[in-house]
Image (cartoon, rainbow, N blue to C red):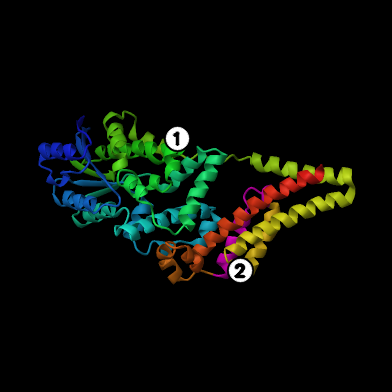
Amino acid sequence: MDESSAGNGDAGNQGAADGGADSLQGQPHAIVERDGVRFTLLGTAHVSRASIDAVNACVASGRYDCIAVELDANRHRALTDPDAMAKLDLFQIIREGKIGLVAANLALAAYQRRLAEQLGVEPGAELKAAAQGASTRGLALRLVDRDVGTTLKRAWAGLGFWGRSKLMAGLGGSLFVDEQVEEAEIEKLKQGDLLESSFGEFAAQTPALFEALISERDRYMAAKLRAIAAESPPPREVLAVVGAGHLKGLRAALADGSEDPTATVAALDHVKPPSKVPWFSIIIGGLLLSAFGWGFWHGGFNLGAKLVLDWVLITAIGGALGAAAAGAHPLSILGAAVASPITPLIPALSSGMVSAFIEAWLRKPTYQDMLNLRQDTGTIKGWWHNRFARVFVNFMLANMGTSLAVWIAGAKLIHGLG
């Protein structure tokens, strides 16, 4: 099934011998034949003009009747539709609790934009070229990558407390740091994966994150490619354009995979739903109310009232300071202050969510804000200047302020009980 495998010059020479594919010369690639379909896996560097040229040459060769790309529907839309950002419904994002996920995507986009400005090449331009080339030539286009949101959710589920903290810190760094990407990172990116590189060394050193970012996606894309062979009529020649970091794993999964591809995709798309019983909030709330009750019972009204007042003031100030740091409207700051003391008791509520909703309502983003979102989020100043982006900053900083204040208030509460 596996006719040739990846390499650099050697793989290119083998590819040329197999079918005169001059466009593959010097490019890492693999050729796998199975289920009557010949799959040419072209490994690309997401920041290389040579990769863009190789993709254009392959698509123009006329050898392929189907083009598969390492994109999901949302990333494809973002690359090919310049107005995609302008179509986002901010209130719906907040209501559905997706504001953190969208903020993560914006943070990743900010990192990619810094790469584009530094290198003069838009990250993922070769994927965009493949998709546009397929459309121009009337070739079948298949998006074979998993949705980024699903990947991040599965990665999150596999991390412990400290792992999640590092993940948030990495995303926060991508969001708020406005410095050049180091040369070492760029060199790794040329042989790796764009999503993996966004998290730096943390991805390589964290098995759960690496599994979700790379290994699972290798199997996912292999299953999607195998599903193409089941189409009626099936294509004869498929060009799959993927990051070089996926080439080895994807080739093995495609050549050796025996599971039902539909079942594999469904399993790797599954995100374990959160527990219907919010045990963490129940435990924290129970401990908090018990501490207040103990204070009133053993220390009288004065001690009990002091414990409650300390908790309310510290957490309210924490949430308010976070919202204020985001440049929020005074009423948004007030909303964060009011919500912060009760957020440990209500799992579906966060001070950031309340503050962000008020901010979006009072300072509605303009259409121009939406159009400028991708550009503005490329700089630190832009996150505060753009009304749409500032809502996400408000959400994040208000929650961070509340979280820090909860720890401080909890420590003071324990001290007060002593």
Drawn side of residue 325 relative to residue 216, left or right: right
- In the picture, the quarter occupied by the N terminus is top left
Drawn side of residue 127 relative to residue 56, left or right: right
Say few, some or many: other residues with alpha carbon within 10 Å of mark 1 (under 14 / 14 to 19 / 20 or more).
some
Residue most extreme to the front: 183
User: Residue 51 at what x, y percent from top left?
Assistant: 23, 50
Say few, some or many: other residues with alpha carbon within 10 Å of mark 2 (under 14 / 14 to 19 / 20 or more).
some
Drawn side of residue 25 relative to residue 391, left or right: left
User: Residue 147 at what x, y percent from top left?
Assistant: 40, 47
**Residue 354 in magenta stretch:** yes
Identity of the amino acid at label 1? Pro
User: Residue 397 at what x, y percent from top left?
Assistant: 58, 57
60 vs 298: above or below: below
Q: Nearer the viewer, residue 87 or 283?
A: 283
Q: Looking at the image, is mark 2 or mark 1 earlier in the sequence?
A: 1
Which image quadrant is residue 277 in? Answer: top right
71 vs 356: above or below: above
Instruction: Give the magenta part as a residue range.
Output: 343-363
Q: Which residue is mark 2?
A: 329
**What residue is at 13 percent from the left and 49 percent from the top?**
61
Residue 207: give its label: 1
User: Residue 343 at what x, y percent from top left?
Assistant: 67, 51
Mark 1: secondary structure = helix
> How far apart are the two marked residues, 2 and 1, measured between alpha carbons?
42 Å
**Residue 84 in magenta stretch:** no
